[in-house]
Image (cartoon, rainbow, N blue to C red):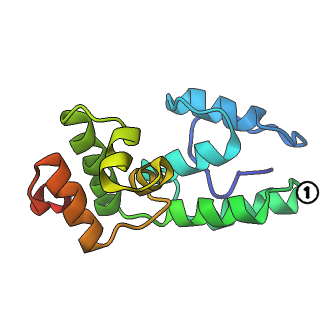
Amino acid sequence: MLYSTALRGLPGTFPSGKRDDLASRKCAAALRIPARGTLAVLLLAKKQGRLVDVDAVLAQIQQADLHIATGILEDLRRMARRSAAYRLFLSRLRQARIEVGLTQVEVAKRLRRPQSYVSKCESGERRVDVVELTEFARLYGKALDFFVS
């Protein structure tokens, strides 16, 4: 059965032979996860500590002849590897912007960057180096340790 090994012990049933997101939606509902789809359920289950090996589930999905684009697989694996500390950093980056009442567009204009830069930094799609973090901190009126402690 698809998912049976990697998600053993999770609530919800996973009917064999289904090659759509029905099983994932049922799992999400059972876990009270507001998600709609296999990949979102995998990420959230990993984040909650209910799933250890995302790659094992992805392998099962691919063996069941479900196609997932290579770029999406790479993004999913990258997101699943994020540590709790990095997820906290991303949360604080967004929180700081919201606390000062700025939109991503406004931040981007002040940093002379496109809005997508701010979005990618906040989502973790783009890593933020210490120089960039200093720029964000100065703009938001926060000390660097706000983002990393």
| Left or right, residue 20 beside residue 102 | right
Q: Where, by quadrant of the figure, is residue 23 drawn?
A: top right
Q: Closer to the camera, 15 or 83?
A: 83
| Left or right, residue 137 beside residue 20 | left
Q: Is residue 17 visible?
A: yes
* Residue positioned 56% across, 46% down in the render: 9
The C terminus, quarter of image: bottom left
Q: Position of residue 121 (x, y in %)?
A: 41, 57
* Residue positioned 26% across, 41% down in the render: 97
Q: Name the secondary structure under disc 1.
A: loop
* Number of dots carrying numbers: 1
Q: Closer to the camera, 113 or 83?
A: 113
* Residue positioned 33% across, 59% down in the render: 84
Q: Closer to the camera, 15 or 23?
A: 23
What's the residue type where badge 1 is placed?
Answer: Asp
Q: Where, by quadrant of the figure, is residue 17 drawn?
A: top right
Q: Is residue 59 above or below residue 101?
A: below
Q: Is residue 106 above or below residue 72?
A: above
Q: Position of residue 118 (x, y in %)?
A: 41, 51
Q: Closer to the camera, 84 or 1?
A: 84
Check the image and name the residue furthest to the bottom: 130
Q: Position of residue 96 (x, y in %)?
A: 21, 43
Q: Which residue is mark 1?
A: 65
Q: Position of residue 88 (x, y in %)?
A: 28, 53
Q: Is residue 12 visible?
A: no
* Residue positioned 59% across, 65% down in the render: 77
Q: Residues within 10 Å of mark 1 (few under 14, many from 20)?
A: few
